[in-house]
Amino acid sequence: MHTAVRRFIKTGIAFLAVGLALGLAMLVQRELLGRWPHPYLVSAHTHALFSGFVMFLILGVALWLFPRPERGDRRYRPELVDRAYWILLTGTGLRVSTEIARAAWQAGWLAWLVLVGGTLQVLGFGLYFWTMWSRIRPVGSHLRESQGERF
């Protein structure tokens, strides 16, 4: 397992820890204090778990398991995957942290940071999948399918 794969997976686990801690805090607030969690906290919790944990894990495992790029593939470049990682990490971290902050303070500039974080997430996912597109291809399975094998 190479460095980029480990980085994606370990980052996903870190976002899982953030999401679980935030979820537990909201659960205590709701069940023991009788206060429904702020919508921004719910959004931060959701982004930590889905964009942070689930997607980083999926992206790391895909990077590990998909077929190697073909010789001469000009689209796939490891440095673009690294760039996508850092864009996604920045975007998701910014999104989660500023939505937590928005639950406490209604400063207008925080809305812009949430928007920047969300935009970086979209750009990061776009760059990752654009880079990986050529690695999503049959390697042997198309031959078995042409012979009637179903799986």
Image: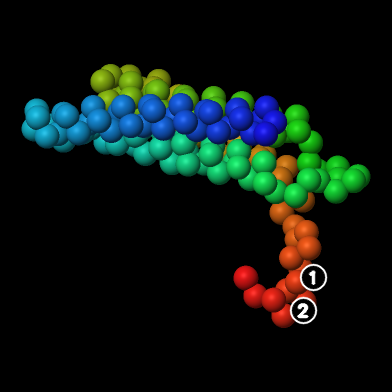
Classify mark 2: residues with Cα within 10 Å, few (<14), some (14-19) or many (20+): few
Report the Cα–Cα distance between label 2 and label 1.
7 Å
Image quarter in which the C terminus is found: bottom right
The residue lying toward the viewer, choosing from 130 and 20, is 20
Residue 85 badge = none
Query: Is 33 placed above or below 49 here?
Result: above
Is residue 53 shown to the viewer in this render?
Answer: yes
The residue under label 1 is 143
- The picture places residue 126, in percent across and down from the top left corner, at 63, 42
Check disc 1 and report its element: helix, strand or loop.
helix
- The picture places residue 55, in percent across and down from the top left corner, at 52, 41
Query: Is 13 placed above or below 101 here?
Result: below
The residue lying toward the viewer, choosing from 131 and 17, is 17
Q: Relative to 19, is 123 on the left or the right?
A: right
Q: Residue at x 60, y 38 (%)?
A: 60
- Asked if labels 1 and 2 touch by Cβ distance under 8 angstroms, the answer is yes
Residue 147 badge = 2
Task: Give the residue type at disc 2.
Answer: Gln
Task: Give the residue type at disc 1.
Answer: Leu
Image quarter in which the N terminus is found: top right
Q: Residue at x 79, y 36 (%)?
A: 77
The residue lying toward the viewer, choosing from 33 and 104, is 33
- The picture places residue 70, in percent across and down from the top left corner, at 85, 48
Q: Residue 123: name its quadrant.
A: top right
Q: Residue at x 78, y 63 (%)?
A: 140
Check disc 2 and report its element: helix, strand or loop.
loop
- The picture places residue 6, in percent across and down from the top left corner, at 61, 30
Classify mark 1: residues with Cα within 10 Å, few (<14), some (14-19) or many (20+): few
Q: Residue 105: name its quadrant.
A: top left
Q: Residue 28: name its quadrant.
A: top left
Furthest residue in direction right, as rendered: 72
